[in-house]
Image (cartoon, grey):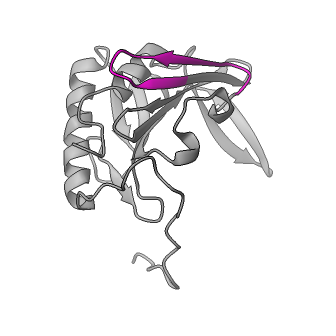
Amino acid sequence: MTPRPTGPQPPLQTHGTVRARPNEAPAAAVARLTGALRDALRTRMPAGMRIEPAQPGCTEPQFQYHPSYREYTVDGTVRRGEDSGFFLLRVSPTGTDLAKPDCQQAYNTLDCKITRFPDGSAAVLSKSEEAPGARQLWVHLLRPDGTSVAVVTNNYRTEVVSNRAKITPTADQPLLTMDQLVTLARSPGLTLYP
């Protein structure tokens, strides 16, 4: 038996966006974005690497729509042999407060780089070491069409032990490089304005 949520729906986030919100139906956007991501993973991922989706019953990554934030996410575990790490990709409308690339928006403001591309997009790149040998890479791509694409990966697992976070490395390095995250984020089709 699966419990059903009770109470009112959470309120919609009301932050402004750099252009009118997308009007594509969420179910259609989930299907389109999922197809674009699967194509990108087939053509842009290194050989022997796969993403295991976090969604039970799914054999391939699939986007989910989060109506209160009006965003689409896919998360799971990236694997190569025995090595693994966390994987998250989020597609959302660019908020007016995030319209210009800025290291103050980065996951780790002390280790940040901004890269601009000929198509007018820009990526905020950041990395951090959460514990010895445990690294996280973060990319936030701002597309000129008003879409933001965030991609995160790491090489560790976090468990709560006696009310404390215990971080255990699951690979020597994150399995995807910063360049590979940027390539995934820039994949055609990962936009809210097709």
**Image check: 118 left or right of 155?**
left
The answer to whether 74 is drawn above or below residue 15 in the figure is: above
| Count of numbered badges drawn on the protein | 0
Which quadrant is home to the C terminus? top left
Task: Confirm whether residue 167 shows in the render.
Answer: yes
Observer-nearest of 184 and 161: 184
Q: Is residue 153 magenta?
A: no
Q: Where is residue 124 in the image (x, y as percent from the top left)?
A: 54, 25
Quadrant in which residue 97 is drawn: top right
Which quadrant is home to the N terminus? bottom left
**Image check: 53 left or right of 69?**
left
Residue found 30% across the figure and 46% down from its top = 192
Q: Where is residue 21 in the image (x, y as percent from the top left)?
A: 36, 56
Q: Where is residue 30 in the image (x, y as percent from the top left)?
A: 26, 52
Chain part drawn in magenta = 109-124
Residue found 29% across the figure and 53% down from its top = 57
